[in-house]
Image (spheres, rainbow, N blue to C red):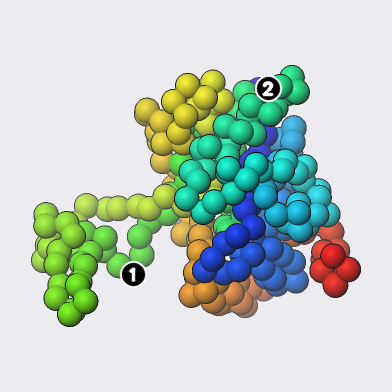
């Protein structure tokens, strides 16, 4: 079956400006996602959908194809499924519609090619239509989540979990943007990644980390340093290109 990788990478991120090309251990963040996709040997094409010409040039430098995103799909509130549907409609018009699509978010730089391959095997062997990568919660229990008002008054968000001993809580996981697989016909029918039924594919919590805030970025940098020191090798997917020359961009 023909598979493509889709990397959605808009340019107007707010919490970390131009997050998708933020410097990260010698390369822009998106470079590690492109490298991981290339190393799988699975994809007939790796497509970066972006509204930012600089992100497009960076993506091409690292070996991806680029599809310019229309202005209507450039906002921060635009669902990723709308971006994916635009890509698929464009490919259909070109006679290149794939059977499978794998969405790889560029803010997951610790995800490896092996994660993509193993989740591909699970997806195809189980004959699934929708599969979302997930990581276990660690260090916190979502069942104990609280909210508070401007005065600091606390409220329980999930009443059924409050004050239950941790060892009695049901295990919980969280979706990560690292590796999402869908069958294109089912996805185009339901027009969502969390289609019916969707399945979860667990992965290592470090490799599945999403970077959304400056605090996330600092934690990811700490993780890379710590894992490299422990294992005596970089935990990042090797990038086969020289760093993008931003000085000449």
Element type at mark 1: loop
Report if residue 7 is visible in the image.
no
- Picture coordinates of residue 166, whole percent (x, y): 19, 64
- Residue placed at 66% from the left, 43% from the top? 69
**Residue sitting nearer the eye, 103 or 127:** 103
Among all residues in the image, which is located at the extreme front?
71
Q: Any mark on residue 139, and which?
A: 1
Q: Any mark on residue 92, and which?
A: 2
**Disc 2 vs disc 1: which is toward the camera?**
2
Q: Would you say 29 lies left or right of 64 here?
A: left
Mark 2 and mark 1 lie on one chain; the one further toward the N terminus is: 2
- Residue placed at 15% from the left, 72% from the top? 154
- Picture coordinates of residue 142, whole percent (x, y): 26, 60
Classify the position of the C terminus by image quarter.
bottom right
**Residue 126 position (above or below residue 132):** above
Q: Any mark on residue 102, and which?
A: none
- Residue placed at 68% from the left, 22% from the top? 92
Distance in Å between CA atoms under marks 2 and 1: 45 Å
Q: Would you say 43 lies left or right of 107 here?
A: right
**Residue 29 position (above or below residue 104):** below
- Picture coordinates of residue 149, whole percent (x, y): 19, 72
Among all residues in the image, which is located at the extreme bottom?
151
Element type at mark 2: helix
- Residue placed at 84% from the left, 59% from the top? 241
**Residue sitting nearer the eye, 57 or 201:** 57
């Amino acid at each position: 079956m023909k598979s493509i990788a889709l990397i959605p990478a808009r340019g107007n991120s707010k919490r970390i400006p131009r997050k998708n090309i933020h410097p990260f251990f010698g390369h822009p963040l998106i470079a590690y996602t492109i490298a991981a996709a290339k190393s799988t040997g699975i994809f007939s094409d790796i497509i970066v959908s972006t509204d930012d010409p600089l992100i497009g040039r960076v993506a091409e430098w690292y070996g991806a194809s680029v599809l310019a995103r229309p202005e209507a799909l450039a906002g921060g509130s635009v669902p990723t499924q709308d971006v994916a549907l635009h890509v698929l409609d464009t490919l259909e018009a070109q006679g290149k519609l794939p059977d499978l699509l794998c969405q790889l978010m560029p803010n997951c730089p610790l995800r490896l090619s092996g994660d993509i391959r193993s989740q591909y095997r699970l997806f195809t062997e189980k004959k699934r239509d929708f599969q979302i990568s997930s990581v276990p919660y660690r260090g916190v229990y979502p069942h104990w989540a609280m909210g508070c008002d401007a005065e600091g008054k606390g409220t329980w968000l999930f009443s059924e979990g409050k004050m239950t001993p941790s060892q009695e809580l049901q295990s919980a996981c969280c979706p990560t943007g690292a590796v999402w697989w869908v069958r294109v016909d089912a996805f185009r029918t339901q027009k969502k990644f969390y289609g019916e039924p969707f399945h979860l594919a667990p992965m290592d919590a470090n490799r599945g980390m999403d970077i959304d805030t400056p605090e996330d970025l600092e934690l990811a940098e700490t993780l890379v340093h710590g894992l490299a020191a422990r294992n005596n090798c970089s935990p990042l997917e090797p990038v086969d290109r020289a760093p993008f020359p931003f000085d000449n961009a």
